[in-house]
Image: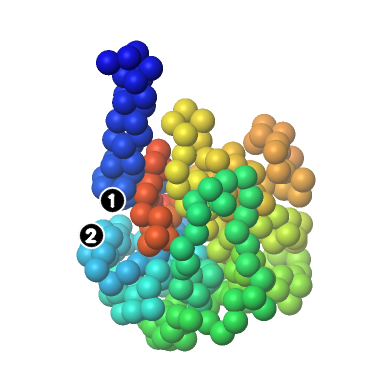
């Protein structure tokens, strides 16, 4: 065999092996990330917050459903769901079954585009280097039973934070939450909830599905000390040793997942440039994927347990 042919066969074999790993194995390797964040007022009792996002469920995904149900064993003080729960018109019962044990704990949620609209077939290359952001006037009427999902979550006691600012007590610790609708489809209305962070709470926490800069900046400017988001899938298909190629929004790729600092003008700057009053930003890589792109590479599906402690 000609050397070039041997090389081509080797490269093709490596590519097929990588695709098999990403589609058959890694996308099922669910993991729990843990971070301690100093965001509460000094002397506050620590709070354990479980962050879930981007399940993208279809009814038959029993492995993912059972893994999420098992997170109830963590006994979190609070649960935050940042949206994109569905990947199929019949997924809401499966989502509620996955969340059922977690609805026993106090919680809150915002919605993502795939809670309103079913996913579409897309060329994966369109995600690289930019955003597939959609304007709602092009999307039309929601194609998913989003009200059933909202009713299931609120009926279980969780607070809807879509374009809402509210104060909640978590184990006798007062916390302010400010959330928006999904900026990826122009459902965000931060001006309707804008305002200086409350001074009679242990922390102000921002909650959003897609971490677009136009929402992150005013949240931090208003005094939010922590922002939780999903949407990015951590890049979903990453280059080992390099990281994400896209966030599918205008957040820089270095912040595609994990914990970092955020301040107005932070994009492209490392955390060691952060001012003293910079907020903490936690972007979860989430648990699922568009059902038409069932792969994960160098980016395991995840949930996050945050322990919030005093500054």
- Residue 266 horizontal/vertical position (percent): 72, 43
Residue found 58% across the figure and 64% down from its top: 208
Residue 63, quarter of the rendered image = bottom left
Depicted 157 relative to depicted 206: above or below: below
Task: For residue 234, say whether it is visible.
Answer: no
Task: Locate the N terminus and report the quarter of the image it occupies.
Answer: top left
Depicted 300 relative to depicted 90: above or below: above
Most distant residue in the front direction: 2
Residue found 45% across the figure and 47% down from its top: 236
Horizontal arrangement in the rendering, residue 306 relative to residue 129 (left or right): left
- Gap between marks 2 and 1, in whole Å? 8 Å
Horizontal arrangement in the rendering, residue 174 relative to residue 136 (left or right): left
- Residue 257 horizontal/vertical position (percent): 51, 46
Say the numbered circle drawn on residue 279: none
Local crowd at mark 1 within 10 Å, few (<14), some, or many (≥20)?
A: some
Task: For residue 149, say whether it is visible.
Answer: yes
Say the numbered circle drawn on residue 63: 2
- Residue 283 horizontal/vertical position (percent): 53, 51
Asked if the residue under mark 1 is in contact with the one under mark 2, i.e. CB atoms within 8 Å, the reply is yes
Say the numbered circle drawn on residue 28: 1
Identify the element where label 1 is drawn: helix
Residue 154, quarter of the rendered image = bottom left
Residue found 53% across the figure and 48% down from its top: 125
Identify the element where label 2 is drawn: helix
């Amino acid at each position: 065999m000609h050397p070039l042919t041997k090389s081509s066969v080797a490269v093709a074999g490596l590519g097929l092996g990588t695709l098999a790993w990403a589609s058959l194995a890694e996308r099922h390797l669910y993991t729990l990330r843990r971070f301690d964040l100093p965001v509460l007022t000094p002397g506050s009792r620590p709070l354990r917050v479980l962050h879930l996002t981007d399940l993208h469920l279809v009814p038959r995904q029993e492995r993912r459903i059972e893994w999420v149900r098992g997170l109830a064993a963590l006994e979190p003080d609070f649960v935050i769901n940042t949206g994109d729960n569905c990947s199929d018109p019949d997924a809401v019962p499966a989502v509620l079954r996955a969340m059922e044990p977690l609805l026993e704990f106090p919680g809150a949620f915002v919605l993502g585009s795939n809670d309103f609209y079913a996913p579409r077939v897309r060329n994966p290359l369109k995600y690289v280097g930019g955003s597939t952001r959609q304007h709602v006037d092009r999307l039309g009427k929601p194609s998913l039973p989003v009200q059933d999902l909202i009713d299931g979550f609120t009926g279980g006691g969780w607070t809807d934070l879509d374009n809402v600012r509210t104060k909640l007590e978590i184990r006798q610790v007062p916390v302010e939450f400010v959330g928006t609708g999904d900026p990826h489809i122009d459902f965000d209305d931060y001006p309707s909830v804008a305002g200086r962070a409350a001074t009679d709470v242990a922390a102000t926490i921002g909650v959003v599905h897609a971490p677009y800069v136009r929402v992150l900046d005013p949240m931090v400017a208003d005094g939010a000390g922590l922002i939780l988001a999903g949407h990015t899938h951590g890049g979903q298909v990453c280059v080992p040793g390099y990281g994400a190629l896209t966030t599918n929004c205008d957040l820089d790729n270095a912040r595609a997942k994990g914990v970092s600092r955020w301040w107005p003008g932070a994009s492209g700057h490392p955390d060691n440039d952060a001012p003293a009053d910079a907020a903490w930003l936690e972007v979860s890589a989430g648990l699922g994927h568009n059902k038409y792109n069932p792969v994960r590479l160098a980016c395991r599906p995840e949930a996050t347990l945050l322990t919030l402690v005093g500054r």
